[in-house]
Amino acid sequence: MFTLSPSVRKSASLIYHFAERESKARYKRSLLGWFWSFMNPLTTVVVYGFVFGVVYGAVAPTTDNGNAENFGIYLFTGLIVWSVFTGVVNGSMGWLIGVSELRKKIYFPTETALLGGAAANAVQTMLEAVVLIMIMIVLANISWTLIFLFLALVQAMLFGLGIGFIASVFNARYRDVQYLIGILLNVSFFLVPIVYTPDLLQKPGVPAAARILVEWNPPALFVEIARDAMYFLEVPQWNRLLAASAWAIVTFSTGWVYFRDQSMAISEEP
Amino acid sequence: MSGTIQVHDVSKKFRLERNRPSSLKEATLRIGKKSDADDFWVLRDINLDIPKGSFFGLIGHNGSGKSTLLRLMAGIHRATTGTIESEGRLSALLELGSGFHPDLTGRENVYLNGAMLGLSRKHMAESMDTIIEFSGIGEFIDEPVKIYSSGMYVRLGFAVAVNVDPEILLVDEVIAVGDEEFQRRCMGRMNQLRERGTTIVLVSHNAQLMADLCDRIGWLDHGRLIAVGEPDEVIGQYLDHVNTKGDNTLTTRD
């Protein structure tokens, strides 16, 4: 029989606690609670679809069956992945600050606060993924390739946590970091083909370096994998899968090691 | 062995940065320049062996490093050099509102503390009545702890700390905040725990209390462990030292 060591069990219950707290805080004092979790992504599809698809006349890429060729849906598929990443990066800094007072008075593994927050985000993301899957079922654009959506979400989560581990430690010392990260994320949003299609970069005049940057930056890889899985219903290219997994694992491990090394110092910040 | 605390050559340095940069901009501007940081050694070369089931007291002037040593034992800070090994479930009541999150209710905080000590929700649910009863918090248990009085904070904190079957219990001065009756209950409970084999480390300025409770006492002075031994003996030395120092200040003032 598989048994968990006491320290793992202890961490698990703390992660659960922090996840629960984060989830409760999200819809505190709201009557409809989790209903908003469905409303947000739904309105996003409609509004973005209208603004980019109708007002700007952006054309969604063609697919084999042509059933889901709508820019709002194309965009939403990418946005889900992007928001996991940014949600965890931005959240991490707040989650660590949120427990720093507590950590000065009692010992507990600090990473549980970040992992708990990430778990709450994962639940939120699952709801968004359910919305996407339901839309695709209605539009009859669904295939077994949807498992790669979950892979992309896990990759984006791990990558975001890796960055979040490092950013949160810096932010505990200098609160400027959260603003800096906010700006960097805003800029990077446009380095990921979410509100535009990657073929836009095939136009003459676009430097090759920009094309490579947009095609191979980690969040873009995750987004493209999700698109292949849910929009084009194709198995993602193996080199893309490999690069995305490598980014996710290496970034997460680096962040984890750094955080474990530095987190004891959190209790000594004034 | 479970329930022991072993302190080997422990020193703790805090950085005193009078002009510590508080923003990234300041920090960047300062790169390459010499830091204003002064190292302040709160503890120096501490060696201490606290056997299982003993009641150990720490005395010393304000700022002598007692609380820092307790925090190192609790795992809140990391020793700069040396090692501290403590085995067994460690429960600590270090300062006002120890380990409580202000926005959570008393009950939620009890569960949170339990989780931090590695106790299951079920276990905590079983101890809940005892904890509420011991703390005398009553129906306030379902109110956020931020509205608690300082006495209520300490009472709930202590109630949790002693009702989680600790193998090691660390208690800082805090119980002094409770009223007479509560303090007596705390003493009684600590004696009970000791009889069950819990190792207890207590920090207090109350020499009489320390002499009554402790098996052994350590005297810290400016971060160094001056003496460890029989309570009467060490307390005597400490008080003599305080008295001569008091006399000296009086004479120099003359």
Image (cartoon, coloured by chain):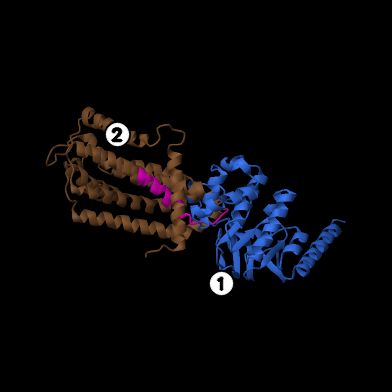
At label 2, counting other C-alpha atoms closer than 10 Å, the crowd grade (few under 14, some 14-19, many 20 or more) is: some
Question: Residues under labels 1 and 2: Cα distance?
Answer: 58 Å
For label 1, the SS is loop
Residues rendered magenta in the picture: A105-123
Q: Chain of mark 1?
A: B
Residue situated in front as seen by the camera: B220 or B36: B220
**Image colour assigned to chain A:** brown
Read off the residue under disc 1.
B1
Report which quarter residue A203 is drawn in: top left
* Three-letter amino acid code of the residue under disc 1: Met
Q: Is residue A239 left or right of residue B213?
A: left
Residue B18 in sight: no
Report the quarter where the N terminus of chain B lies: bottom right
Task: State the image coordinates of residue A54 (x, y, percent, origin top left).
Answer: 21, 28
Report the quarter where the C terminus of chain B lies: bottom right
Read off the residue under disc 2.
A42
Task: State the image coordinates of residue A201 (x, y, percent, origin top left).
Answer: 20, 42
**Image colour assigned to chain B:** blue
Residue B178 in sight: yes
* Three-letter amino acid code of the residue under disc 2: Leu
Residue situated in front as seen by the camera: A43 or A190: A43
